[in-house]
Image (cartoon, rainbow, N blue to C red):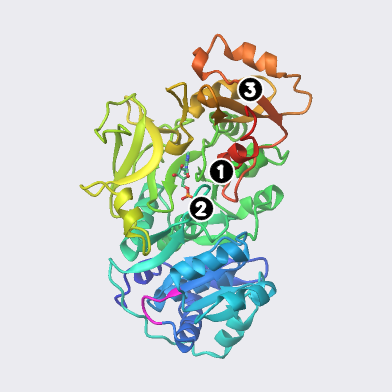
């Protein structure tokens, strides 16, 4: 034990002979993690990275990228992953805000990144784990005195995905990451015998902390896949036991003829999160595979908050119960008072999993927390009599039309049930009379035969007049971000003049 709260816990269980993770070209045993992270940690220190410094990383997924995360924690520094899709303009904002002492980028991006770096060093790492960082690591010592870090010290800063407004850096402590992973290992019954098909990106909490931390902490293994591809996932199933995915993974696997009960036979657990899993996808998946998806809910700022049960009923369209060490309440958006089960309100959570606030942003931090320490998620939810929580949308997605509140999810559920509809997004658009007009953007399958009039006709007997869309627009696909979230802000922007 080195006294580094997170690092010690991540590597406590892995047996020396066991595989921690593998790529198509290389396997890393648990016995490799000590020396490999030591080499990288030595490079960090040589480059002047001190405990508490930020290491900003915008690179493709690779085994070395994962080792770099571990090495940063081991060196007592703060890991700062950045979505590979961010542009140089966005990168300039993150660098200015976080003031990293080291930036690691793709070799192809070096010419653009270097002028933004200021005082930071810049090293490169490509999708194959090659670059100046690896070159330096190869020449560095494989021994390193792990830097002690306490529970309250920061291990990572993750910028919120920011589908609206400026991204904020959620400050994640050693305790937040370690306790959340520990809780999930127990709840989801992960052991050293588990092998995860890891095809999520590792610049986001889902792939980085939920997937990686949980598997390492259990002493299990990971099959690292650069990107999600249904055929590649199916091909890995004979050697795997579990998959963590966003809803798109599951709809795309359902569209693949190779998804059969025989194909999933070795798998014990399918987990979904980061965006709402349509109830229909849950139902179709269970019918096809006999293995109900376990849906959970979390966010960058809090890690995981709720989960459907491992052993009990996994209810489609819900995100299950609060985790054992998370307190969850649903409150009135205006007054902040707790409201009864069955009513929609804002979800607030408190527990060791919650972030320490936003990096260098005292104002947003104060706004995000109640006086009694509860974090205001901004998600709208409802709890049923059995305690299952459902997410009904984001606070900012709420549509106010003619002074009346419309929860998009309720309208979307009705539209999604119509034959020919793949999915829908209901948004509020500026309208002279109503303030906002309820508008449906509907993704339809080939040969659907729907028209605006037939959709409206079908909704008329099912929804109050004020909830019925004023217009229905048809599209082939809804726009999504990398984590599978429908980009409602983008839809609102694209169609903002619809009623002008
Ligand atoms: P991020 O910080 O990128 O992980 O996004 C967090 C947000 O994703 C949450 O605040 C929710 O709005 C949404 N989210 C995550 N998991 C779920 C889920 N299972 N169902 C519905 N929304 C979810």
Relative to 173, does residue 327 appear above or below in the rendering? above
Q: Is residue 227 magenta?
A: no
Q: Residue at x 67, y 77 (%)?
A: 111
The residue wearing badge 3 is 471
* Mark 1 vs mark 2, CA separation in Å: 10 Å
- Mark 2 and ligand 1: say if the CB distance to the nearest ligand atom is below 8 Å: yes
Q: Write down the region rendered in magenta.
A: 50-54
Magenta stretch prevailing secondary structure: loop
Instruction: Choose mark 2 or mark 3, whichever is in front.
Output: 3
The image quadrant of residue 473 is top right
Q: Earlier in the sequence, mark 1 or mark 2?
A: 2
The residue furthest right is: 447
Using the image as rendered, state which of residue 479 and residue 281 is in the foreground.
479
Q: State if disc 3 and disc 1 touch (CB < 8 Å).
A: no
The image quadrant of residue 428 is top right
In percent of width and height, residue 134 lies at: 59, 81
Instruction: Choose mark 1 or mark 2, whichever is in front.
Output: 2
465 left or right of 455? left
The local crowd at label 1, few if under 14, some if 14 to 19, many if 20 or more residues have their Cα within 10 Å, is some
* Mark 1 vs mark 3, CA separation in Å: 23 Å
The residue wearing badge 2 is 161
- Mark 1 and ligand 1: say if the CB distance to the nearest ligand atom is below 8 Å: yes
Q: Residue at x 41, y 39 (%)?
A: 379
For label 1, the SS is: loop
The residue wearing badge 1 is 485
The local crowd at label 3, few if under 14, some if 14 to 19, many if 20 or more residues have their Cα within 10 Å, is some
For the N terminus, the image quarter is: bottom left
In percent of width and height, residue 260 lies at: 66, 38
Using the image as rendered, state which of residue 327 and residue 53 is in the foreground.
53
């Amino acid at each position: 034990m080195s006294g580094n709260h997170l690092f010690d816990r991540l590597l406590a269980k892995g047996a020396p002979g066991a595989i921690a993770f593998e790529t198509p070209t290389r396997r890393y045993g648990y016995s490799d993690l000590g020396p490999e992270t030591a080499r990288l940690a030595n490079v960090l220190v040589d480059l002047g990275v001190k405990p508490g410094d930020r290491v900003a990383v915008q690179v493709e997924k690779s085994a070395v990228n994962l080792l770099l995360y571990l090495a940063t924690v081991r060196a007592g520094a703060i890991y700062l992953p950045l979505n590979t899709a961010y542009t140089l303009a966005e990168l300039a904002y993150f660098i200015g805000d976080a003031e990293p002492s080291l930036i690691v980028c793709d070799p192809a991006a070096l010419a653009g990144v270097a002028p933004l770096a200021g005082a930071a060093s810049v090293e490169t790492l490509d999708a194959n784990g090659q670059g100046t960082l690896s070159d330096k690591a190869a020449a560095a010592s494989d021994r390193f005195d792990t830097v002690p870090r306490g529970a309250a010290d920061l291990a990572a800063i993750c910028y919120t995905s920011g589908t609206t407004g400026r991204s904020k850096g959620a400050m994640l402590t050693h305790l937040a990451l370690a306790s959340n992973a520990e809780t999930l290992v127990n709840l989801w019954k992960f052991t050293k015998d588990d092998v995860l098909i890891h095809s999520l990106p590792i610049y986001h909490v889902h792939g980085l902390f939920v997937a990686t931390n949980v598997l390492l902490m259990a002493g299990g293994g990971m099959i690292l896949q650069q990107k999600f591809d249904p055929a590649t996932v199916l091909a890995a199933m004979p050697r795997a036991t579990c998959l963590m995915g966003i809803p798109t993974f599951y709809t795309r696997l359902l569209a693949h003829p190779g998804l059969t009960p025989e194909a999933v036979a070795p798998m014990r657990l399918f987990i979904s999160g980061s965006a709402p899993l349509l109830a229909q996808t849950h139902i179709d998946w269970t019918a096809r595979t006999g293995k109900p998806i376990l849906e959970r809910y979390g966010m960058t700022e809090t890690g995981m908050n709720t989960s459907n049960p491992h052993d009990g009923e996994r209810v489609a369209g819900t995100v299950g119960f609060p985790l054992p060490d998370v307190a969850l309440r649903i409150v009135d958006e205006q007054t902040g008072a707790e409201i009864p089960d069955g009513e929609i309100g804002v979800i607030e959570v408190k527990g060791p999993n919650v972030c320490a606030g936003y990096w260098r942003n005292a104002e947003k931090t104060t706004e995000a927390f109640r006086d009694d320490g509860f974090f205001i998620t901004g998600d709208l939810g409802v709890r049923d009599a059995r305690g299952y929580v459902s997410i009904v949308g984001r606070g900012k997605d709420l549509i106010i039309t003619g002074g009346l509140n419309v929860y998009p999810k309720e309208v979307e559920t009705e539209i999604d049930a119509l034959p020919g509809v793949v999915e829908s997004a209901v948004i509020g658009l500026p309208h002279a009379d109503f303030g906002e007009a309820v508008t449906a953007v509907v993704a339809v399958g080939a040969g659907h035969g729907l028209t605006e009039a037939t959709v409206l006709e079908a909704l008329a007997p099912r929804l109050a007049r004020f909830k019925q869309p004023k217009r229905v627009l048809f599209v082939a696909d809804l726009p999504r971000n990398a984590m599978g979230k429908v980009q409602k802000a983008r839809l609102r922007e694209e169609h903002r003049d619809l009623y002008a």
